[in-house]
Image (tube, helix red, strand yellow):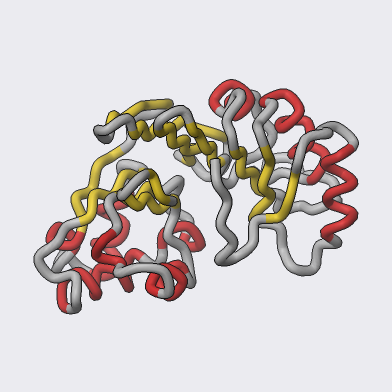
Amino acid sequence: MRAGERTVVLDFGSGAMNRLQSHLDPADVDLIAISHVHPDHCVDLFALRVYMVWGPGVGKTIPVFGPAALRQLVIDFAGEIGWDDAFDFRPMDRPAGRQNLGEGLILSWREVPHGPPTFALRLDWQGSSICFGADCGPNDAIVEFGDGVDVLVLECSFGTQPMVDGVGHLNAEEVGRIAAAAKPGRLLVTHCYPEHDEQAVQEGIARHYDGPAAFARQDHSVSA
């Protein structure tokens, strides 16, 4: 995500490193925020560490906001070498927090129900805003946290299927309910698997939310 001349990355799962390199030098990223420590949301930090410590990014350090366990988790997996050279790990407070990044750019986070802790993430800059709901089950936190944002990004892992009790993911109708209450400028749906029928998902969302909604697409740009 771009805010003026700054680049902020929200989550860094499998494939993110290659996609990032197709757009800019990864060493030029100003900040990474990790919503939770499940591999599909953070595993490419391993590839980025190599780039920053032994590759073109040597000499630069990227701030990484994330759950308090993130730094020790990656060290336990791959050893201590290089992590604190590549990244400045900054734990996110539970259950919520806010960081002024300067020049009007604000990063906020709020805990949502998934593998604990998981944080929804929000960026505000010069009157524009985006809220990324991360992975989460049904909750009211995002309604308040994402109230009136320009772009609300919500997962839809269950597609049109019923949600499973105790599994922290959403389906189309619950996405619609949350969006209807939060009233964003637009809704983007993500974490919705290829086998899901996109039209049926859109119809499920539309039962509750009548605003603009679309599936997030790789390499497509969206302005807040």
Residue 94: % across, % down? 38, 29
Residue 49: % across, % down? 25, 68
- Total count of labels: 0
Residue 184's quadrant in the figure? Answer: top right
- The residue that appears at 45% across and 67% down in the rendered structure is 16
Residue 58's quadrant in the figure? Answer: bottom left
Out of 116 and 87, give the one closest to the viewer.
87
- In the displayed image of the protein, which residue is found farthest to the left? 59
Taking the image as shown, residue 112 lies to the left or right of residue 83, namely right
Residue 29's place in the image compared with 187, above or below, is below
Quarter of the picture holding the C terminus: top right
Out of 211 and 122, give the one closest to the viewer.
211
Out of 83 and 144, give the one closest to the viewer.
144
Out of 148 and 121, give the one closest to the viewer.
148
Residue 219: % across, % down? 55, 66
Taking the image as shown, residue 136 lies to the left or right of residue 210, namely left
- In the displayed image of the protein, which residue is found farthest to the bottom? 55
Residue 63: % across, % down? 24, 49
- The residue that appears at 40% across and 53% down in the rendered structure is 9
Residue 203's place in the image compared with 221, above or below, is above
Taking the image as shown, residue 11 lies to the left or right of residue 131, namely left
Taking the image as shown, residue 58 lies to the left or right of residue 47, namely left
- The residue that appears at 24% across and 74% down in the rendered structure is 51
Residue 181's place in the image compared with 52, above or below, is above
- The residue that appears at 71% across and 31% down in the rendered structure is 178
